[in-house]
Amino acid sequence: MISGLCIDVSAKELKAHLGARADHHEKKAEWYRTQASTLSEGGAGTEMSNDPVRSLAESEQQHREKAAYFRFMEQHIIENETYRLSQNDLSQIELSSRYYPGVHF
């Protein structure tokens, strides 16, 4: 009997995905840093909260933390193994949103 739904993913595929997610979050962090810098220098921007620069800086930090998480995971994948991922695992590593935008487990 099989209990639950798990997906087997090769180490190579998982490592590539984790690296791509780290790259994505690094780019997003840089975008938020640029936006915060522009606003703090008096550039044009839209009101996001009572303190838009702080809000942008917080978003930057969140993406930096996610990038570090994914980069760490990527660097610790055991080569030539198969990883059995649960629905929670897929959601945690943002795999579901990559293949099915808008669908979250």
Image (tube, rainbow, N blue to C red):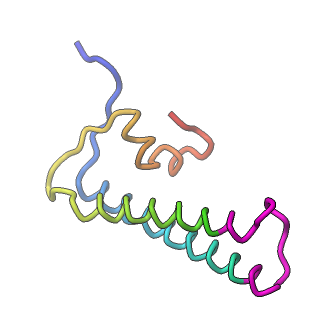
Q: Residue at x 77, y 79 (%)?
A: 39
In the rendered view, tell whether residue 88 sits above or below residue 10. above
Q: Give the quadrant of residue 45.
A: bottom right
Q: How far across and how far down the image is residue 89, in percent?
A: 36, 40
In the rendered view, tell whether residue 47 sits above or below residue 30. above
In the rendered view, tell whether residue 62 sits above or below residue 43. above
- Residue 21 located left or right of residue 62: left
- Residue 30 located left or right of residue 66: right
Residue numbers of the magenta segment: 38-56
- Residue 6 located left or right of residue 53: left
Q: Residue at x 40, y 33 (%)?
A: 87
Q: Nearer the viewer, residue 28 or 15?
A: 28
49 magenta-colored: yes
Q: Give the quadrant of residue 11.
A: bottom left
- Residue 23 located left or right of residue 104: left
Q: Residue at x 50, y 33 (%)?
A: 105
